[in-house]
């Protein structure tokens, strides 16, 4: 992974992009690409790149041009099938100067145009500038693993991997929260592209390509998920047995894992949580990695969150060189401002903070690339949300039944304050609008309602902005036409991918924490071919009655320790609000939650926040905080820190950089180091 940035004049009459602005942009992205930096500039466009060298270490510098030196690319990510694409391009007459996947990407675009992105199996944010046609093409991978933000201001388009680079380009670019982005975050846990957190700055929608062509702008999808439609086998639906499905999933997962190890010119490690998904990836990764394979795990000082026993069990079984970092509440509080600097958005959980520390350990051990199990829960129905949706729909068909509602007791066994521990409360909580069991978004509605309760803390101005909005309804209004023909499980999976996975798990908890320490994450479960297979499976193969990830467990049974396969699902969690209310809590917390700071940001009401803070402080002894209070305090604090760092203080964040590629066509200067 790397960092990309650029400026394009939207009018041919505009002045050339400033070299100094491009230098400031790339200077903010050094953490994403510490190995090399490069620059290209002509009369209309400027491209900047910060490189984390993983493939073709000696010749993969960027920006990189085609053989005619007329079309230029900056690229963040990896194209895992670049070798196969290269062979096809050579057969078409293309010649190559490097072994990099970046050069394959630019030649693929020259050969196939925007259809090239359909052929790519990987993770990417790409910008291609055709200096002859005056055309800019932006593309982002299917799931938004790699970030890409853009902003139009004063006749120019600015784009970058991170918002801080756009802000660094021009001090005149407005810095303010977008109320729609704040409202989405405090409903859906995240913004949903193209919506951003800051006014005027949008995210490219995953699976889309956006083209600027001499005054016109066009955006279209090059990929969208497909699921079986209607009863009975249809085109594209898997028709084999469960054993057949397990065999095909095993084969696809092996191929996806192997690709992500062998298509790297540096050692590849693996995160190991102790759950089924990372254990499977680690087991397969060890097979393809050769002699030395390093795994990395988080331990927690709080026993409630600690999974050390399971992590060490898998590490021993795989024979990996295993490393651990122990995280306490004070550790989370201490690094939280830095975490928010990298997330660039509010978060409702502290879970990214331990992963920030873990990626630091990875980098200390000399590893640039790690595999993770991310995506398995979304592709194979692993979350309690999917089971909850199935139970509530079953109950909704007979709402008067008391036996059907008892199935709720099988959910959320890992929570100390589980919403199902008290039947009366559970029936009230999960039974709301139960008659709408066949409505779109039904399974997600309880989460969205719970999260939206935080809006009671909004300031008067923010309440006025959000009162006419309904983020859930707006999301559902944009569903694809075929959504109604999918199974209930497929509908739930689609919405989970669109919201929590892309915007939170792959971003705040994924790319941003990894790249904070210059580490690239790779995700075998999000391989294009494996995803296509998983989506084609019948719903019962993934969620068999209430047995989550059923077919994946069949894959794991012969190769993963049985204790891992049979253990109850426990999602990754970390201590939350209690990290920030201890007597020795860092001083920045009091400053960020002060009445002055709250009034300046004008997102939350100071009196309401004071009551919340007092309530949390009163519970430091027993640690018995509700889910709503935990989310609220973390959400408020992260938003306040975000305001301090990106709105109020206006830091450039740029560091001086040396260039390995320096192509300045405006001044007819070219230097390649």
Image (cartoon, rainbow, N blue to C red):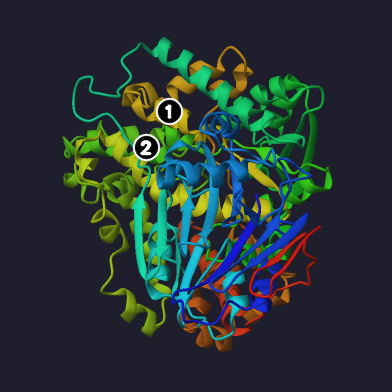
In the shown orientation, is residue 573 left or right of residue 503? right
Q: Position of residue 22 (x, y in %)?
A: 65, 72
Q: Position of residue 101 (x, y in %)?
A: 62, 41
As measured in the structure, the alpha-carbon distance from the residue carrying label 1 to the one carrying label 2 is 8 Å
Q: Name the residue rendered at 28%, 65% in the picture.
A: 470
Q: Name the residue rendered at 22%, 30% in the picture.
A: 229
Query: Compared to 457, does 144 lie above or below?
Result: above
Q: Residues within 10 Å of mark 1 (few under 14, many from 20)?
A: many
Q: Position of residue 33 (x, y in %)?
A: 72, 56
Q: Residues within 10 Å of mark 2 (few under 14, many from 20)?
A: many
Say if residue 193 shows up in the picture.
Answer: no
Q: What is the quadrant of the C terminus in the image?
A: bottom right
In the shown orientation, is residue 538 left or right of residue 346? left
Q: Quarter-wise, where is residue 314 in the image?
A: top right
In the shown orientation, is residue 181 left or right of residue 618? left
In the rendering, which numbered label is found on residue 548? Answer: 1
Q: Mark 1 near mark 2, Cβ–Cβ under 8 Å?
A: yes
Give the camera-side residue of 50 and 375. 50
**Residue at the disc numbered 2:** 386
- Report helix, strand or loop for mark 2: helix
Say if residue 181 shows up in the picture.
Answer: yes
């Amino acid at each position: 992974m790397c960092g990309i940035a650029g400026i394009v004049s939207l009018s041919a009459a505009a002045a050339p992009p400033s070299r100094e602005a491009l230098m400031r942009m790339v200077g903010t992205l050094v953490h994403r690409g510490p190995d090399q930096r490069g620059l290209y500039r002509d009369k209309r466009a400027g491209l900047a790149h910060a490189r984390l060298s993983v493939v073709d270490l000696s010749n993969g510098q960027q920006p990189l041009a085609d053989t005619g030196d007329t079309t230029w690319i900056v690229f963040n990510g990896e194209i895992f099938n670049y070798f196969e694409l290269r062979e096809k391009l050579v057969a078409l007459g293309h010649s190559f100067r490097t072994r990099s996947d970046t050069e394959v990407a630019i030649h693929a675009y020259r050969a196939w145009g925007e259809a090239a992105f359909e052929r790519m199996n990987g993770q990417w944010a790409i910008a291609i500038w055709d200096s002859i046609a005056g055309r800019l093409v932006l593309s982002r991978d299917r799931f938004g693993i790699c970030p890409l933000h853009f902003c139009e201001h004063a006749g120019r388009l600015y784009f970058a991997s991170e918002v801080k680079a756009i802000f660094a380009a021009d001090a005149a670019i407005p810095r303010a929260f977008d109320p729609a982005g704040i409202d989405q975050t405090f409903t859906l846990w995240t913004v949903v592209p193209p919506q951003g957190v800051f006014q005027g700055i949008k995210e490219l929608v995953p699976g889309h390509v956006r083209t600027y062509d001499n005054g016109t702008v066009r955006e279209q999808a090059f990929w969208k998920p497909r699921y079986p439609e209607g009863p009975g086998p249809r085109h594209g639906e898997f028709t084999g047995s469960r054993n057949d499905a397990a065999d095909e999933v095993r084969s696809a997962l092996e191929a996806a894992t192997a690709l992500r190890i062998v298509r790297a010119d540096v050692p590849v490690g693996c995160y190991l949580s102790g759950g089924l998904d990372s254990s499977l990836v680690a087991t397969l990764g060890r097979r393809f990695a050769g002699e030395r394979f390093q795994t990395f795990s988080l331990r927690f000082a709080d026993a409630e969150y600690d999974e050390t026993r399971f992590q060490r069990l898998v590490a021993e079984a795989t024979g990996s060189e295993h490393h651990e970092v122990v995280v306490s509440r004070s550790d989370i509080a201490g690094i939280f401002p830095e975490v928010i600097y990298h997330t660039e958005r509010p978060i409702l959980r502290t879970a990214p903070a331990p992963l920030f520390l873990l990626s630091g350990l990875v980098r200390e051990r000399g590893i640039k690339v790690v595999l993770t199990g991310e995506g398995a829960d979304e592709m194979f129905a692993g979350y309690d949300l999917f089971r909850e949706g199935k139970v509530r729909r079953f109950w909704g068909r007979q709402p008067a039944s008391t036996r059907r509602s008892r199935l709720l007791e099988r959910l959320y066994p890992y929570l100390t304050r589980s919403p199902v521990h008290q039947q009366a409360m559970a029936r009230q909580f999960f039974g709301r609008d139960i008659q709408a069991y066949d409505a779109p978004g039904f399974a997600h509605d309880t989460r969205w309602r719970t999260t939206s309760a935080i809006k009671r803390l909004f300031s008067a101005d923010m309440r006025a902005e959000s009162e006419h909005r309904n983020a859930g309804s707006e999301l559902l209004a944009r569903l694809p036409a075929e959504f109604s023909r999918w199974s209930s499980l497929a509908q739930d999976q689609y919405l989970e991918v669109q919201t929590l996975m892309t915007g939170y798990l792959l971003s705040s908890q994924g790319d941003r924490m990894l790249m904070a320490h210059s580490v690239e994450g790779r995700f075998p479960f999000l391989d294009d071919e494996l995803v296509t297979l998983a989506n084609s499976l019948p719903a019962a193969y993934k969620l068999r009655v209430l047995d989550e990830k059923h077919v994946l467990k069949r894959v794991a049974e012969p190769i993963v320790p049985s204790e891992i396969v049979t253990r109850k699902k426990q999602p990754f969690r970390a201590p939350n609000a209690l990290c920030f209310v201890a007597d020795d809590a860092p001083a920045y917390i009091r400053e960020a939650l002060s009445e002055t700071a709250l009034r300046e940001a004008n997102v939350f009401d100071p009196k309401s926040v004071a009551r919340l803070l007092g309530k949390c402080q009163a519970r430091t002894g027993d640690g018995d905080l509700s889910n709503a209070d935990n989310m609220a305090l973390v959400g408020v604090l992260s938003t306040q820190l975000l305001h301090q760092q990106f709105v109020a203080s206006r830091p450039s964040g740029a560091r001086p950089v040396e260039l390995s590629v320096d192509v300045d066509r405006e001044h007819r200067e070219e230097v390649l180091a």
